[in-house]
Amino acid sequence: MKAGFVEGTIGSLLAASEYAATAEQVAAAGGALQRVDPRVKAAGLFALIAAVALSRSLTAIGCVFVAAILLALASGIDPRLLARLVWIPVLFFTGAIALPAIFLTPGTPAFGFGGIAVTVQGIRSAGFLIARAETAATLSALLALTTPWPWVMKALRSLGCPIVLVAILGMTFRYIFVILRTAAEMFESRKSRTVGHLEPADRRRLAASAAGVLMSKSLHLSGDVHLAMQSRGFRGEVYVLHDFHMRTADWWWLSGFVLMTAAAIWFGG
Amino acid sequence: MHIPDGYLGPSTCIALYGGAAPFWYIALRRMKKALHTRMVPLLSLFSAFSFIVMMFNLPLPGGTTGHAVGVGIATIVLGPWASILAISIALVIQAVFFGDGGITSIGANCFNMAIVGSLVSYAVYRTIAGRTPIRSPRRVAAAGIAGYIAINVSALMAAIEFGIQPALYHDAAGAPLYAPYPLHIAIPAMMIGHLTIAGLAELVISAGVVAYLQRAEPGMLRATAPGARTEEDFSHPALKPLWTALALMMILTPIGILAAGTAWGEWTPRELAHAPVGLQHLASFWTAPMPRYAPLFLRSPSFGYMLSAMVGTGLIILVFLAVGRAAGRRPD
């Protein structure tokens, strides 16, 4: 079989599993952010992301980025891990989009490059795009890497997210890994049964039937899960246990997040 | 098409969160009413499926590969409202946990892909598929076209959102603060990739899965085919050879005329040297409308044979249909 399609899909599926496993491992390790009340952490990091989106100053965004790196270090997150998971992919994606802007944005020429002028406005615009994308992605990764998903869900519930959505989000996250494993096994078994080269049309047919089988399995599984839920007394009402308690340290963290957000908005305004 | 943080300005993000909210609200209410206790597991599992499908590396014509959103197939199987919720939930998890798409742009991503994508898919699919049977090839084409158009309209929405940023947000020197390209650059840049690669990926997955479900689980295509005709049993691929053979046999019925003599045991009193009295008496008791398979108004015995075969077969089919209906069986 031609390398690429099946291997690529298995690679994507395994990368998602690997990311989740890494997140679980980091979240279980001791660190500054891991000890913070998830409600404070989620609200604080979301507020900082909003501040980055609002900011009109590259310096202010840069300061938040440095603060995010310090938070990562204090939480025992290796910067190389952040570089692999966040910084390099974001730089490649956003960098590719931002690069032409330095030539295409009209404005004051900064210097020439092969007969094409690079403008000051273009450099500044590309800088904003990359800085915002990198900083927000780092803050978002800090939440995912230092908080188990069920806690994120509970935090969202505490922050006013509708309970039914919290339940669906929580269950979806759990079953993503069930379906992910099923999909990976389906492709692995198909790969092991296939000898020789598959024509492009056959590869497309294989992908479509794999998706169809997976959809059918998902819907049948949802029926089984529904019956299991009903047999345990589920009648449509969702309850989430609240067992978070604000400690003194959490109040300090909350104050810190408020101050950082206010400063980012003030200096970036 | 997953817009990251930093590409859209604050007011655009807020407007798109605001634009998405009523759709989420209506979808949630409709689903709660329609599914009740089934809503949570069904939407969860389908959202998880949508998440995984977005990771499929789809082989496309020309040798390249692409990723689909799966909005076309989600809409066709679940209907537009459930699809809005399922795709939105998958997008939220992608953004919050996997960092694919921004937190501030969740509203925009859901509006473009989940809401616009689902509604466009539904409209296009229903328009093209019409009331054709569930197993009709037209439904496969409709699904492919619906997926292709939906993803391109979603991309166009994203391109417009990008394209208005330089006009809305720039500093005193004119440097754009968010997405830097105006509409005349953003739209072609976005659409070229979607009209070619991403659109084809959506077409392949939508049409391919519908073709697969037609063979394996046609019941899953019923949600968005309320008026689908049920003559499909008559055009079912497995029955086609039987219908062809039946038609051939009807055409060949005049061959019987070539045979010399009469069929054994089917004699008339005139063909017997000494016909029994009872036979002579009962032979005139019933005169068939088409005696000897030759209607009286037709001169050609060959054509008469064929016509008789057609009438006879038609009557038998009608009787079986009537019995089926009376017994409460639907042809599907």
Image (spheres, coloured by chain):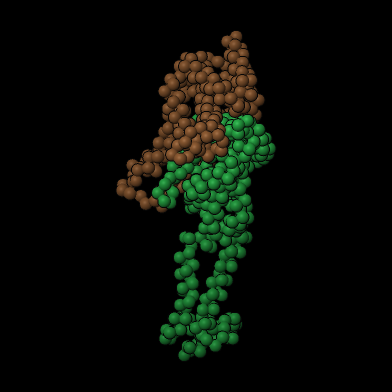
Q: Position of residue B36 (x, y in %)?
A: 64, 37
Q: Residue furthest left?
A: A196
Q: How many marks?
A: 0
Q: Of residues A188 and B232, which is closer to you in this image?
A: A188
Q: Quadrant of residue A163?
A: top right
Q: Describe residue A197's horizontal placement relative to residue A110 as left or right.
A: left
Q: Describe residue B318's horizontal placement relative to residue B251 as left or right.
A: right
Q: Position of residue A74 (x, y in %)?
A: 48, 15
Q: Give me the residue at 47% from left, 81% from top.
A: B254
Q: Of residues B90 and A31, which is closer to you in this image?
A: A31
Does the rendering let one see residue B329?
Answer: no
Q: Position of residue A87 (x, y in %)?
A: 46, 27
Q: Give me the residue at 57% from left, 61% from top.
A: B231
Quadrant of the rendering where the C terminus of chain B is positioned:
bottom right
Q: Is residue B284 above or below residue A211?
A: below
Does the rendering let one see residue B171?
Answer: yes
Q: Quadrant of residue B313?
A: bottom right
In the rendered image of the structure, the colour used to display chain A is brown
Q: Of residues B129 and A257, which is closer to you in this image?
A: A257
Q: Position of residue A227 (x, y in %)?
A: 56, 35
Q: Give me the residue at 46% from left, 84% from top.
A: B257
Q: Of residues A152 and B69, which is closer to you in this image?
A: B69
Q: Give me the residue at 47% from left, 42% from top.
A: B67
Q: Residue furthest top?
A: A248
Query: Which chain is assigned green?
Result: B
